[in-house]
Image (tube, rainbow, N blue to C red):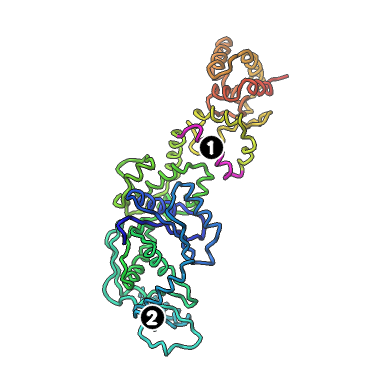
Amino acid sequence: MTDSVVTRFAPSPTGFLHIGGARTALFNWLYAKKHGGRMLLRIEDTDRERSTEPAIAAILDGMKWLGLDWDGDVVYQFTRAGRHREVAESLLAAGKAYRCYATSEELTAMREKARAEGRTRLYDGLWRDRDPKQAPEGIKPTIRLKAPLSGETVIEDQVQGRVVWQNENLDDLVLLRGDGNPTYMLAVVVDDHDMGVTHVIRGDDHLINAARQKQIYDALGWDIPSMSHIPLIHGPDGSKLSKRHGALGVDAYRSLGYLPAALRNYLVRLGWSHGDQEIFSTREMIDAFDLQGIGRSAARFDFAKLENLNGHYIRHAGDAELVTMFEDVLDHVPDRSSLKAKLNDTTRAQLLQAMPSLKERAKTLIELIDSAYFIFADRPLEVEPKAAALLTPENRALIGRLKAALEPVSPWTAETTEAAMRAFADAGGLKLGAVAQPLRVALTGRTTSPGIFDVLAVLGREECLARLGDQTPA
């Protein structure tokens, strides 16, 4: 092993980059960055039937969007199958492994018998010490590890503590299948060793794998990397995370309008803590991250907490940066894609001008888009039913008088239009709200919007007077 820290993220490309995988990638990335080391990316595509190119693309894209870069080229596990076979053959030659000619029927009978007797060791060692000359014809043998029959296998885990398995309960692992393809267990060990991985940080669903992999390391005389098995993420109700809880792909969170920085911040606090601190810049995360801060119990996913955190990041983002994010998310939200055609120099400038007011209440970029709809709305406005109820004959007449009061305003700003509206309300003995709400409906078609004076300023004199004219009785 080298002195420098080398971590790895090793997803199986059988689907999108899910939220648990994204957190594992983040923890590996932070640990490597903190120690001035490297994080490698390995795609574990040995399951040829389930591994797909779109899944690989989704994983790479999701990591790039989250800002989790990796060092060196992506390693594809399947391309290293020759090396894996070579290691299996070396164990065979050293007497640390053997050929097993058991038929599928014999293996099924063994498993059923073991389960009936309450044993976890399912393979009974049928070919462990048998002369291969007795092999039946036509059976392609697997290669199995000669696992120790007594004693213990121990992992000193940085998160789970000391974990001990009795060897009598662990099977002689298959290293090479009958078709010559290496198993996942062998491939992981050989790849981690060859890639110089010093720290394995992964979900605790891999903890039993650690015991099996330790036996392979021992048989090969290789040093085992430091192991850290992090608890899985559960739903708010404590059950296994499902799609209804938020077990979506990272690309789905992008489409829902979450900021990568906010999702990163949320994920780092799922199962790891640093005092009471909730908000972390990337630099603060790197400086503070340690394995000791990871808890042993499952973290609970909380959409409300993620939304609030996202709202914080939106409020603190630069206005121009948010305009860019606004455009980017439109590419990932099919039902808002028509807005893309309406983005031009004028609407971008209006969006930028409106952003200080828009971002105050939005918790996601989708909410930001929805509250900016008035900039892109076509005339005559489509008025929501609740808002249409306010367009009474009296209010339409009021809008007509208000239009006349606003026409001479120059220059047209939030301040000058506010002054004109207040003067109009005072002259008519009206409360400002009684004037502002019909005005809001006439300008936006809705009962809620950013501040009405901001709306007036952003839309500009010509558009505002035209929209007021649309709601004025002839």
**Percent coordinates x, y for residue 144 in the rendering:** 39, 77
Whether label 2 touches label 1, CB < 8 Å: no
The residue positioned 62% from the left and 41% from the top of the image is 337
**Mark carried by residue 98:** 2
Q: Is residue 72 visible?
A: yes
Main SS, magenta region, reads: helix
Question: Would residue 382 be counted in the magenta stretch?
Answer: no
Q: Is residue 386 visible?
A: no
Question: Would residue 318 be counted in the magenta stretch?
Answer: yes
**Percent coordinates x, y for residue 213 in the rendering:** 36, 68
Q: Which amino acid does label 1 sit on?
A: Thr
Question: Which segment did they paint magenta?
Answer: 317-334
Helix, strand or loop at disc 2?
strand
**Percent coordinates x, y for residue 105 in the rendering:** 48, 81
Query: Marks 2 and 1, how far apart in space?
Result: 60 Å
Q: Quadrant of the C terminus?
A: top right
Does 45 appear above or below 118?
above
The residue positioned 66% from the left and 29% from the top of the image is 381
Helix, strand or loop at disc 1?
helix
Q: What residue type is labelled 2?
A: Tyr
Does 291 appear above or below 45?
above
On the rendered structure, is 164 left or right of 439? left
The residue identified by callout 1 is 324
On the rendered structure, is 239 left or right of 35? right
The residue positioned 57% from the left and 15% from the top of the image is 421
Q: How many labels does the image show?
A: 2
**Mark carried by residue 254:** none
**Within-10-Å neighbours for mark 2: few <14, some 14–19, many 20+:** many
In the current view of this chain or complex, which residue is farthest to the bottom? 134
User: What is the quadrant of residue 316 in the picture?
Assistant: top left
